[in-house]
Each structure stands twice: as structure tokens, then as C-alpha cells.
Amino acid sequence: AAEYEAAMRAMPREVVGVCDRSGKEMPSLDLCLLGSGADGHCASLYPHSAQVVCSPGCDRVYLPAEGKDGITLSIDAINSAHNVLISAGKTAQSDMVRKSLGWSNAATNHALPAGMISTSGGAVVEWILTENSAADLPAM
């Protein structure tokens, strides 16, 4: 993860944009498409994991993905993207969707990484839902 992050940070700004809206320079992706789980995880960031607890405020872009042979983005790096799409299409995700979109403290709740993805860094965040996964949301 550290080597990949160093390589990305070394790229010219024309290749990898930089977001300084959050008060620190982070590479800024144009689009970040994330899956999520009923437990509130997204982007291989699991509830209460070390990767989630260090965010927000983590100056890392890439982190080792817990339990996987790979890497993931930090919450701060995701929030620095220009656009974020979060997919949640299963009935079992309806409670997680309600909490992620409705809790006033969702952006700092380590039990709900999907809810920590926010517009605070300037990202446009949109959720891709089904009728079943949106079933617990209040009527509009």
C-alpha cells in the first residue's frame, strides 16, 4: 500500500488531480464507485477496523485491505473524490442505508463506514438503491 501511494503521489497533478478542500493535499479521483454491505462496510473498510478508526484525519491514500491481499482507499481519500457512487441494492441493506443517510453522526461513526462517506470534502455523493434497499427510508 505504501509503495502504491508513493507512486500515485509522485504522479503529475495533470494525471492525478489534487484535492485540498479538506485542508490537506490528497489525490482526487474523478469517480469512486463503491459497493457496500449490510454491516455498513464499503470499499473493504469494515466497522471498527483500524483502517476506519484512523479516519477522518488519516493522511494516507491507500491502506491494506483488512483480511484481503490488496489495498483500499482511506475514507479521506474517498471523500476527496469529485463524485462518489455507493451501491446498496439488497433488502438486507435497508437498515444500513437508513442509518447511513439519516444519522446526524454517521460521518464520524466507526460502526458505519458507508455513512462516513460524505460531502464534507467536496464530493458529490450519490447512492444507487433499489426499492427494497430503500424500504426503511422515510417517505418523501
Image (tube, helix red, strand yellow):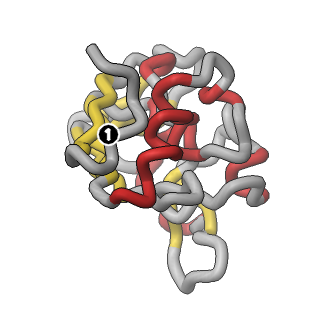
Picture residue at 39% right of the left edge, 22% below the top: 138
Secondary structure type for disc 1: loop
Q: Quadrant of the N terminus?
A: bottom right
Picture residue at 23% right of the left edge, 37% below the top: 30
Q: Residue furthest bottom?
A: 69
Picture residue at 55% right of the left edge, 68% below the top: 3
Res 41 seen here: yes
* Residue 130 placement (x, y as % from top left): 21, 48
Q: Nearer the viewer, residue 58 or 46?
A: 46
Res 7 seen here: no
* Residue 21 located left or right of residue 127: right
* Residue 49 located left or right of residue 42: right
Q: How many marks can you see?
A: 1
Q: Is residue 125 above or below residue 12?
A: above
Picture residue at 25% right of the left edge, 44% below the top: 129
* Residue 5 placement (x, y as % from top left): 52, 57
Q: Crowdedness of circle 1 by 10 Å Cα count: few (<14), some, many (20+)?
A: many
Q: Residue at label 1?
A: 134
Quadrant in which residue 134 is drawn: top left
Q: Nearer the viewer, residue 89 or 75?
A: 89
* Residue 105 placement (x, y as % from top left): 68, 22
Amino acid type assigned to the residue bearing label 1 in the image: Ala
* Residue 63 located left or right of residue 14: right
Q: Is residue 21 above or below residue 40?
A: above
Q: Quadrant of the C terminus?
A: top left
Q: Is residue 2 above or below residue 17?
A: below
* Residue 115 placement (x, y as % from top left): 54, 36
